[in-house]
Amino acid sequence: MPLGSACNLSCYFCSNRYNPPGIMVFNIPFLPSDLIKDLIYSLNPQEKIIIGESATRLNEGEPLFHPQFLAIIKELRRAFPKTLIQITTNGILLSPKIQEALSSLNPIELVISFNSLKASKRASLLGDPHPEETIQHFYYLVRSGIKFQASFILALPFLEELPESLKIVEDLGAYYVRLLLPGGSKWAPRDLQGSMEDWLKLKKRMLLLRKRVGIPLVIEPPLISGLKTEVEGVIRGSPAEKCGLKAEDVILKINGKEPDSRQEAFKIINQAENPQLEVQRGSQSLEFTIFKKMGEKSGLVFSNDLDVESLRGLSSVIPEKGRGVCLTSELAFKVVSLAFQKHHPQVPVLPVPSLSLGGSIRTLGLLAVQDFRVLLSALKGNGRSFDWVIVNPIFQEDGLDLRGENLQTLEKEFSLTLIYPS
């Protein structure tokens, strides 16, 4: 649920600063309280309410910056007494008073973008007008008892202080940490346009650092190349920790069945009651039972990889005749290729380079229709034309990419049929 696009920071790595011309993203003013009340009652009380996590064309700014922020959260709690409210914040306005107010409205979960705990860097690189005060507010989190996860961007200026910062947020009570690889379009500074080799070096460095921290550290994007169901971390005090599971364990079977992906393993384990696991730990083969209720979260943390259920569903829609191909992003290419080799070996998989945004943008959701057009034109020029193309439904509900173009225009241009996993 968006509250507005205004932000009280000016982070040098903010992607909104480096959008190219023609990108269809929208800034909105602070939404008035009457409109927010209408929006509140359109929400689903069975799903957690997410505030401040930009996942659409709307730029979501700092939610605590809204002048009626607390009144909005109180109204949400009155409407949905038990629904989890997740709030993504830069933490500048997390005063002890605000923390106490939020704590009284549980269940609340904060996603705090710490990025730096050094006053000088917060001032110069984040634009924090009162960095010492913000840092003191962070230290109050121990007393407030609010459940929170932390995030840090792995940009060069912050790497030296990261080990100390991770120790601090662990002591403050963070239950989970997201380490975000720096991403920027070709209009961004060079240190935000990391090559894949740069990213892999950073990941290797962070995996070593993970061994020194007692809470899960998850790297995003995960840079995974296979579907091995390896555990990234285990939440403290969770059923998974209580039964003895650890980071780097590989889940071989769940109740006797082999999962096809991390996403599938996560889903099956959380849905099951007292799931029995066969696990590979180094050279050992071990068995565990996670004692938990059906639907209760296990506390296991996995990198997100692939929805194999929708992949299996392609069997009923893939044409028996004609030439076809699956197009995916550079980041997902290896994982998708392995999955297709297992489930649909007759379908080749090709990566689509991100040319429109460029830089270090490699995710599927940020590809433009023009990127698909360039690849299909090159293939056609080399005598490789296709009758049908499989592509994930990656664009917004209106079917448009970030430039406002519909992927279906490619059907007429290249005389092909687009197939979407359900």
Image: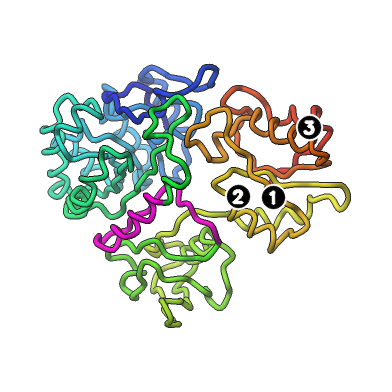
418 relative to 214 in the view: left or right: right
Residue 349 has which mark?
Answer: 1
Identify the disc placed on residue 223.
none
Asked whether the residues under the numbered discs 1 and 2 touch, taking CB atoms below 8 Å apart as contact, a structural biologist would say yes
Choose between 317 and 67: the one closer to the eye: 317
> x, y percentage for residue 214?
25, 62
Give amino acid for label 3.
Glu
Q: Mark 3 points at which residue?
A: 411
User: Is residue 385 something one can see in this rendering?
Assistant: no
Q: Residue at x 57, y 27 (%)?
A: 356
- Which quadrant is the N terminus positioned in? top left
For marks 3 and 1, give the one nearer the viewer.
1
- Residue density around tag 1, few if under 14, some if 14–19, many if 20 or more, within 10 Å: many
On the question of residue 58 being in view, the answer is: yes
Q: In which quarter of the image is residue 260?
A: bottom right
Question: Residue visible at 86% across and 53% down?
Answer: 320
Q: Nearer the viewer, residue 59 or 222?
A: 222
